[in-house]
Image (cartoon, grey):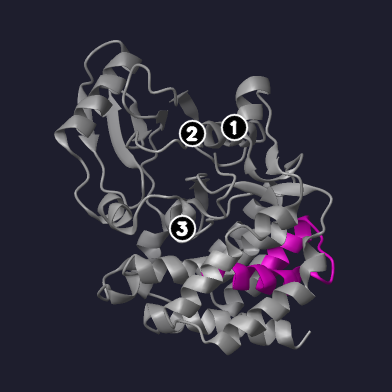
Amino acid sequence: MRSDIFYWKCDHTLSVESKKELYFADKYSTDSISAAKSIAHDFLGKEPVEFNHLKVDGNHFAYYFSDGGTKLFLRTDDGSSEDCYMLAESAIMEELGKSAMPVPKVFATCVDLKRFPVRYQIMEYLETPSLNTFYQQNTLNFHSIARESGVFLSRLHQHKYPKFGFIDIGVLSGEKRISGSDQTWASYFNKCLDKHLGYLQDNQILSSETIRLIEQILERRKAWLDIREGSLLHRDFAYWNILGTPEKISAVIDWDDAVIGDPADDLGIVNCFNAPDFMEILLESYSSIRPVDESFKPRIWFYTLRNMLWKTMIRHYMGYFDRDKKFFLNKNDLNLPLKEYSLEKINQSIKKLSTL
């Protein structure tokens, strides 16, 4: 189902125009709201006292409803794709919940499209805002959140499962256990790599010389991909997917991109968005709980480079580089426009890896 996908948002087959409509347009049609209300009614066994849709970016639809008491969160897709990864997300949150990890509790998951024209999850409704709210308001306590992030990720990466890459939905459905879809981490890592590099070259975002240098670096460090056991990775551990206060993480949401792989990859994702000081505090906190070897920090830059390739590609074709200053990705630690910031992260990664 995700056998040829490196990152769902970037690599699934929906056209660019359809992606833009799904991510940015007013997607709550009468039909989608009606289906969501029916799901809420079916779950409660009666008409919800409260029901409303929520403003969200991304490829999912979000609502809250209640019977007059506890609020519940309803998340649906549009029913058009063949992707059933909600099963994986729910299984992951159930597993992490057993370890008292701060994730939402899931009450129902359905992906069969038999009763309703959409796939859905029903979870506890969390009133806490995302950390992106505080980041945009300049009230985020970076030191505290960096330490909290290190603790969370170190605990997350203690969860190890067979194989690598995206969770195998077939295995999960049949045996109720978490396992990857790829035999090796390298197999997952290299998916769509040529497509990402080709796009950046064809659209003159990166020069041919830079592309060759990146290919040489990735080839030279391919031994880092030869890992025998993978950890559970969130792979989108960013402020908008973390709920809490300016000083504390209370929940981590949106496990749609979770895979099994090298823990340094998760920190590579975080490094795509954060300053060196933040990363140093995070890594100190992380390694105090989960000791790392001498290659761990260089591997963070290795994965930063790999992830910035698809991020720069999607930012270009989705028109992110043309959005005004209010667009949430336009705020960064270097105070650069998003395109320049993206290229600078690629250049930083190349410089770090070239000196090894």
Within 10 Å of the Cα at label 2, are there few (<14), some (14-19), or many (20+) other Cα atoms? some
Residue closest to the eye, 43 or 251? 43
State left or right for residue 44 relative to residue 256.
left
Residue at image position (81%, 63%) is 292
Circles 1 and 3, Cβ within 8 Å, touching? The answer is no
Q: Is residue 138 visible?
A: no
Asked if residue 353 is positioned above or below residue 307 in the image, the reply reads: below
* Residue under numbered circle 1: 169
Image height of 135 relative to 105, above or below? below
Name the outermost residue toward the left. 30
CA gap between label 1 and label 3 equals 20 Å
Residue drawn at x 34%, y 75% as measured from the top left? 321
Q: Do the numbered discs 2 and 3 sit on residues whose CB atoms are within 8 Å?
A: no
Q: Which mark is residue 10?
A: 3
Q: Start and end of the magenta stretch?
A: 283-309
**Which numbered circle lies on residue 84?**
2
In the rendered view, tell whether residue 149 sits above or below residue 323: above
Q: Position of residue 78 (x, y in %)?
A: 32, 37
